Image (cartoon, grey):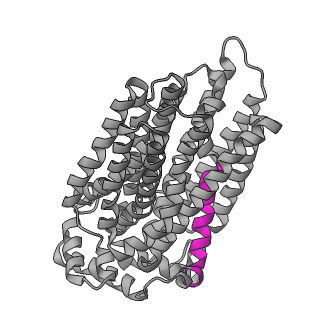
């Protein structure tokens, strides 16, 4: 008996290739941190006022919001593979504009394009991974999504720390070129191909992703066919709001929780939060990136063994405790030895670690698992829109709250939000470990997921 399914290496390869757009997204998001240092040290080819800096940072979210809904529709119209492939020319165009920039508008357009590409990658890549993965490793393969995104952030932080403006942009521009070449080698999602009536192509796609004998292959192909047939409509908005209302409420709540837990603030305002640690902004950013990547290992080892709900709750409890410690430390006076500063660094990194073993990576798993193929794109668009909107509100509130009540007030709020989020996960988030998409959809229709000791159809657990 093997721990990994037959053909796991094929699935891992396809997962890695389709996750490269998230590596690109990580570099585009991480680029703003060293860019701020270039501006401070007069090493940027373009001079920006504080207002222009704010717009440069914000426009990536604008692009994210603008393309969040079209990206979900596009993945059902032209397919998962082709949709995610579009991130290659869009991202490359953005980096070229940054390389040749001699006016702030070059940076504005580049950041907007990068936001558009990020929206596509955040919506389409998790869907592709969930649809092509075997049930037994579906959660663990989401690690690749999290890892590549974290690697992109860390790459931008490290290169930006060690190199100049042009070198950073050149290194980042090479990634979409390599991605475009490698993406030719992977098949499209068998679920999508079955959904659009291309059953023979779906079978060929599944064959490229598996090493089953004929009996097991036909059994999984039949499960895909049944899952798509059960929801053979064209995925209208009313289907998402009525038929899939319960999973939509759960996923959108988790999406909002992902931002109100303070993750975006700690990354964007690292230099402000960690001012008493005597670290440079770039050094703090690199430490953040390392802790995000370190969280990938425990996530990979536990998500398919213990399930989604326990990991969500551990993540919420750990993050809540760390935020309480941060609030207490921020109330203390800095000491000459720097012990308070190092305690603050440890607690902030602890919060970042707990956030990234559950709240951050698990959303990409469940947003794919909870919805049938016909509304998965719309649901993913709603998730990205919710994340972007919530992130914008939380980021905008940080500075005014800090000025009125101090930094600790923000973290008291994050602790309360995360605590209530943990209660929500315990009461309302279903366990989907070891279930096929069809079984999960059936469970939501009949509310069988509330009975965690209920009977499971063994046919659905084989793959």
Residue 56: horizontal and vertical position, in percent? 53, 43
Residue 446: horizontal and vertical position, in percent? 56, 84
Residue 279: horizontal and vertical position, in percent? 57, 21
Tell me which corner region of the image, top left, top right, bottom left or bottom right, holds residue 265.
Answer: top right
Residue 251: horizontal and vertical position, in percent? 57, 66
Furthest residue in direction right, as rendered: 404
Magenta highlight on residue 274: no
Of residues 19 and 163, the one nearer the viewer is 163
Quarter occupied by the C terminus: bottom left
Residue extent of the magenta highlight: 241-261
Is residue 431 visible to us here? no
| Residue 209, above or below 51 | below
Of residues 380 and 43, the one nearer the viewer is 43
Tell me which corner region of the image, top left, top right, bottom left or bottom right, holds residue 164.
Answer: top left
Q: Please name the residue shown 60% across and 68% down the image.
A: 250
| Residue 24, above or below 142 | above
């Amino acid at each position: 008996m093997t721990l990994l399914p037959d053909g796991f290496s094929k699935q891992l390869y396809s997962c890695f290739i389709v996750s490269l757009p998230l590596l690109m997204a990580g570099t585009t998001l991480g680029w703003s941190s060293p860019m701020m240092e270039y501006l401070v040290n007069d090493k940027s080819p373009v001079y920006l006022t504080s207002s222009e800096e704010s717009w440069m940072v914000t426009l990536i979210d604008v692009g994210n919001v603008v393309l969040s809904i079209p990206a979900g529709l596009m993945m059902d119209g032209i397919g998962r593979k082709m949709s995610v492939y579009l991130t290659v020319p869009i991202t490359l165009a953005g980096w070229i504009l940054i390389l040749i920039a001699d006016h702030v508008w070059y940076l504005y357009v580049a950041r907007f394009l990068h936001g558009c590409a990020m929206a596509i990658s955040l919506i389409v890549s998790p869907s592709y991974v969930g649809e092509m993965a075997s049930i037994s490793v579906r959660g663990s393969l989401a690690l690749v999504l999290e890892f590549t995104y974290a690697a992109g952030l860390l790459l931008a932080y490290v290169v930006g720390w060690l190199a100049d403006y042009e070198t950073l942009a050149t290194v980042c521009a090479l990634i979409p070129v390599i991605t475009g070449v490698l993406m030719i080698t992977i098949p499209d999602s068998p679920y999508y191909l079955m959904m659009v009536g291309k059953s023979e192509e779906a079978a060929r796609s599944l064959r490229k992703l598996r090493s089953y004998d004929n009996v097991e292959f036909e059994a999984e192909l039949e499960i895909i066919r049944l899952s798509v047939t059960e929801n053979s409509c064209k995925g209208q908005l009313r289907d998402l709001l009525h038929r899939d209302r319960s999973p939509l409420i759960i996923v959108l709540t988790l999406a909002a929780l992902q931002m109100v837990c303070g993750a975006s603030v700690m990354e964007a305002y690292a230099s402000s939060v960690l001012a008493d640690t005597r670290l440079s902004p770039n050094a703090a950013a690199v430490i953040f990136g390392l802790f995000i990547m370190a969280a990938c290992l425990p996530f990979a080892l536990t998500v398919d063994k213990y399930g989604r709900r326990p990991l969500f709750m551990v993540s919420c409890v750990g993050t809540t405790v760390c935020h309480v410690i941060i609030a207490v430390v921020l109330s203390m006076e800095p000491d000459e030895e720097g012990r308070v500063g190092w305690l603050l660094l440890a607690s902030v990194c602890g919060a970042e670690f707990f956030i990234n073993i559950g709240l951050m990576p698990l959303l990409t798993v469940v947003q794919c698992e909870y919805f049938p193929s016909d509304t998965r794109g719309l649901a993913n668009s709603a998730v990205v829109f919710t994340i972007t909107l919530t992130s914008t509100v939380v980021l905008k509130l940080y500075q005014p709250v800090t000025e009125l009540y101090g930094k600790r007030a923000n973290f008291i709020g994050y602790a309360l939000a995360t605590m209530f989020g943990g209660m929500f996960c315990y009461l309302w988030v279903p366990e989907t470990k070891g279930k096929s998409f069809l079984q999960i959809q059936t469970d939501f229709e009949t509310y069988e997921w509330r009975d965690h000791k209920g009977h499971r159809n063994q046919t659905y657990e084989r793959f």
